[in-house]
Image (cartoon, rainbow, N blue to C red):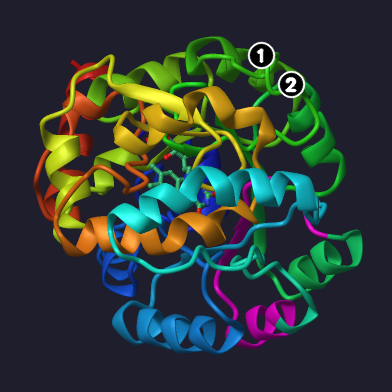
Amino acid sequence: MWPSSRLTELLNIEHPIIQAPMAGFTTPEMVAAVSNAGELGSHGCAMISVDRFRSEMHQTIAATNRPVNMNFFVHEPPKNNPEKNQYAVDLIAPLFEEFGLGAVPDIVPNHFPFDDDMLEAVLETRPAVASFPFGMPEQSAVAALKDAGIIVLSSATAVCEAVDLEQRGCDAIIAQGWEAGGHRGTYLSTEEGARIGTMSLVPQIVDAVSVPVIAAGGIADGRGIAASFALGASGVQIGTAFLTCAESATSIAHKMALLTAHDDDTRITKAFSGRLARGLNNRYVELLAEHQENLPDFPLMNTVTGPLRKHSVAIDSPDFVALYSGQSVTLNRELSAELLLKTLIEEAQALIYP
Ligand SMILES: Cc1cc2nc3c(=O)[nH]c(=O)nc-3n(C[C@H](O)[C@H](O)[C@H](O)COP(=O)(O)O)c2cc1C
């Protein structure tokens, strides 16, 4: 039993917990484990091709017949700015030299946008839920998804975004607080203004929209879940806490950094992708701290950082890995997804129904 059944009924799940989609970190194995446990497993598909999406979707549905969520990026196309490209190449080149990585690659996008081909693949494979972190796709795509019975979720970092998402047909809204790990979902508000903590954001969004609200950002144990319900949310979306689960694709260097981090170790940086994201501080983040406003647009910056990240992972060094993490990182536990969920539910239930 939970204080609100709006989300569990909408998503046809037992417990109002969504394991956050995390492109590059979630796996079909993790999604299936979470959905089989009665929550909503989500897969971050922003960095995979249409073919790979089809294959990973098939792997997922072979492992669970419960609802799953597939997540895609929709965002403004980046502006190609040769001056900014050169600035980034000049900054990064000495690091490539230090590690013998050859020439810095050409700057091209390496994210797969949610285009017509991806839409077709989603309509064909029919996940129960599709979600989008930086606003909604074109209205025609939203209509096609909803006509196919697919529930559409998106995230808001300010009230104006939540109102916009509801108007565009979003079925439930993820209120992403400033504590959250990974990229900021801000798309209508301002980078500065939308630095709103989960505790402030959730009740204000709850008051502004009529669809269910899902709290996200800094929720990592039963206390965060119970607090989210007290703030009026109908459920929670949790990311960082799942990064240290056995089923995640998190690198060893990243897992070790998460498990030894302190509360004040996270930074907000554009250094990895060109878009603000929260992660643990490391040598690369420090090096680029003064240069953030001169970097190429999201997601172009990913191209130049790709080989450095791979090299860092290969030698188990955290120095150049994008150590995405939310602010509640010290609450992370090293459990299987199933055991983490069981623990979260027991902790939350004990607080909500003492
Ligand atoms: C490593 C990592 C990768 C993420 N990638 C995505 C993504 O691909 N799509 C998305 O909608 N959200 C992504 N997020 C954000 C989550 O959806 C969510 O807002 C966030 O994890 C909540 O905060 P928490 O990490 O403190 O639990 C990511 C978060 C992390 C930590």
Tell me, for residue 326, which label it has, or none: none
Marks 1 and 2, Cα distance to the nearest angstrom?
7 Å
Residue 313 in view (yes/no): yes
Q: Residue furthest top?
A: 200
In which quadrant of the rendered image does the N terminus lie? top left
Residue type at tag 1: Gln
Query: For the image shown, how many numbered marks are present on the structure?
Result: 2
The structure residue drawn at horizontal position 81% and vertical position 49%, both measured from the top left corner, is 169
Closest to the observer, 183 or 54 = 183
Q: Marks 2 and 1: in contact by CB < 8 Å?
A: yes
Residue type at tag 2: Val
Question: Percent position (x, y) of residue 189?
Answer: 77, 24
Question: Percent position (x, y) of residue 64?
Answer: 33, 77
Question: Percent position (x, y) of residue 121?
Answer: 65, 85
Question: Percent position (x, y) of residue 281?
Answer: 32, 28
Highlighted magenta segment, given as a residue range: 118-137
Q: Which residue is mark 2?
A: 159
